[in-house]
């Protein structure tokens, strides 16, 4: 097997796209490498994949990798992904979104993609902040955090992306951090193989902005924080809500079956074309 550096290099676009825009120590690159490793291991060809993003630091990911890619508008990755999957169900359609992209401006599309159960593998890189625009509060910023848009402390409660995905109907829901790379690769693989809407929350460090309000001074401290605060789902099941306060529950949270939208849509098209 190729070393990670060589393998990843084979999947990156050369020349003009680099240097990338990510800050040193940002977690997005760790996720990108894990995604590439799993795609390679699972044997997809580059042409099988369509990787779609909205806007944000996380949204830059498709710019760097050599798949079919779309860098769309803020919050709209899932709308483009839905159209592509309906038009060409053979393709493996993947979205990469920031927390703001997926569940603030794109929240409506997120819940309806889950409700429809269209086969899209969606990765939500949750760094608890709007990174690209300078560190404003997002729906996953902790209450009390001092951010660019909440200088006296964030008044809003944060919400749980995985619970939202589950309640909206996603058939596969998992969470990992970028610290837990083996788990991350396992859930990426499972999500890619799921025949329905899969949501994977990837807790990732924004060292430049979230590090400040989490009072963590370096990428290393932030990853140690991910390690020390994560609880595997099997253990979490025996813990109370109070005990889980401030913890990151990791692992496969939902894995269930439900009719998927694009297969029903293809059947309908076939039936109607006979009439
Ligand atoms: C319609 C629209 N509104 C606002 C923006 C400005 N904008 C660009 S990225 C972004 C937030 C990015 O945060 P997130 O989605 O969490 O991704 P991150 O940068 O943290 O990876 C915003 C508000 C935009 N580009 N388009
Ligand atoms: S601003 Fe934050 S999320 Fe964006 S590249 Fe820098 S560290 Fe990463």
Image (cartoon, rainbow, N blue to C red):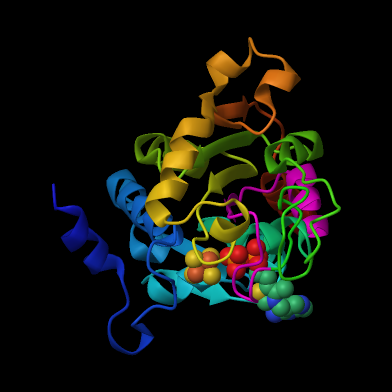
Residue in the foreground of this view, choosing between 183 and 224: 224
Up-down: is 52 above or below 232? below
Residue farthest toward the top in the current orientation of the protein: 238
Image quadrant in which the C terminus is located: bottom right
Residue in the foreground of this view, choosing between 114 and 267: 114
Residue farthest toward the right in the current orientation of the protein: 155
Residue drawn 61% across and 27% down?
A: 253
Coordinates of residue 101 in the picture (x, y in percent)? 69, 64
Up-down: is 173 above or below 128? above
The image quadrant of residue 255 is top right
Residue drawn 71% across and 47% down?
A: 267
Q: How many marks?
A: 0
Coordinates of residue 244 in the picture (x, y in percent)? 66, 24
Please give left or right for residue 26 compared with residue 37 in the image.
right
Please give left or right for residue 251 compared with residue 138 in the image.
left
The reply to whether the magenta stretch includes residue 119 is yes
Q: Is residue 87 visible?
A: no
Q: Which residues are magenta?
A: 107-135
Residue in the foreground of this view, choosing between 172 and 106: 106
The reply to whether the magenta stretch includes residue 37 is no
């Amino acid at each position: 097997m190729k070393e990670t550096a060589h393998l990843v290099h084979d999947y990156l676009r050369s020349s003009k796209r680099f240097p990338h825009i990510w800050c040193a120590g940002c977690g997005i690159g760790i996720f990108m490498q894990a995604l590439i490793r799993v795609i390679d291991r699972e044997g997809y060809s580059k042409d099988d994949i369509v990787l779609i993003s909205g806007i944000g630091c996380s949204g830059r990911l498709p710019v760097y990798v050599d798949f079919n890619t779309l860098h769309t508008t803020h919050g709209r990755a899932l709308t483009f992904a839905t159209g592509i999957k309906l038009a060409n169900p053979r393709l493996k359609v993947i979205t990469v979104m920031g927390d703001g992209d997926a569940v603030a401006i794109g929240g409506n599309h997120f819940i309806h993609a889950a409700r429809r159960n269209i086969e899209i593998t969606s990765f939500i890189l949750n760094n608890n902040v709007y990174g690209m625009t300078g560190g404003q509060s997002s729906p996953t910023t902790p209450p009390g955090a001092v951010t660019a848009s909440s200088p006296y402390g964030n008044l809003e409660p944060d919400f749980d992306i995985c619970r939202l995905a589950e309640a909206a109907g996603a058939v596969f829901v998992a969470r990992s951090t970028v610290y837990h790379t083996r788990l991350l690769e396992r859930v990426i693989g499972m999500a890619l193989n799921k025949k329905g809407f899969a949501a994977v929350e990837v807790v990732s460090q924004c060292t430049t902005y979230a590090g400040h309000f989490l009072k963590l001074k370096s990428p290393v401290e932030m990853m140690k924080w991910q390690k020390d605060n994560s609880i595997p789902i099997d253990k979490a099941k025996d813990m109370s809500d109070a005990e889980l306060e401030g913890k990151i529950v990791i692992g496969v949270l939902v894995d269930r079956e439900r009719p998927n939208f694009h297969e029903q849509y293809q059947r309908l098209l076939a039936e109607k074309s006979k009439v």
